[in-house]
Image (cartoon, rainbow, N blue to C red):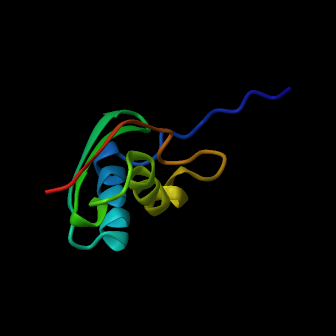
């Protein structure tokens, strides 16, 4: 079996901006904070009225749905969301 050396990928700050932009594309009125925690790991806080009346799972599904492409493939830019907080203003 061959050893695969993984590329370090883009800087975490650039990936954080990609995450923020992807979420803003789905939830344009949201206040979004993305904090890099390490290579490929992030914490996200999203505040939006769109979450009103939704349970926690549905709220998080909206956010994860926005960033699915960033978590796909063999060497994705986003490996894990260590913390996802969805808030209603």
Residue at x-position 36% and y-position 60%: 18
- Is 7 located above or below residue 16 in the figure? above
Q: Position of residue 26 (x, y in %)?
A: 37, 71
In depth, the one of 33 and 13 nearer the eye is 33
Dividing the picture into quadrants, the one containing residue 54 is bottom left
**Apparent side of residue 57 relative to residue 69 in the rendered image (left or right):** left
Residue at x-position 35% and y-position 45%: 11
Dividing the picture into quadrants, the one containing residue 1 is top right
Numbered-mark total: 0
Q: Position of residue 78 (x, y in %)?
A: 47, 45
- Is 37 located above or below residue 33 in the figure? above
Residue at the far right in the pictured view: 1
Residue at x-position 29% and y-position 66%: 50
Residue at x-position 30% and y-position 59%: 20
Q: Position of residue 34 (x, y in %)?
A: 26, 47
In depth, the one of 30 and 50 nearer the eye is 50
**Apparent side of residue 75 relative to residue 4 in the rendered image (left or right):** left
């Amino acid at each position: 079996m061959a050893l695969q050396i993984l590329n370090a990928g883009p800087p975490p700050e650039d990936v954080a901006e990609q995450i923020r932009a992807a979420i803003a594309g789905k939830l344009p009125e949201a206040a979004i904070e993305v904090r890099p925690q390490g290579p490929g790991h992030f914490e996200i806080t999203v505040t939006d009225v769109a979450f009103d009346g939704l349970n926690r799972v549905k709220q998080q599904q909206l956010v994860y749905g926005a960033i699915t492409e960033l978590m796909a493939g063999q060497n994705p830019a986003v490996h894990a969301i260590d913390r996802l907080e969805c808030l209603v203003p």
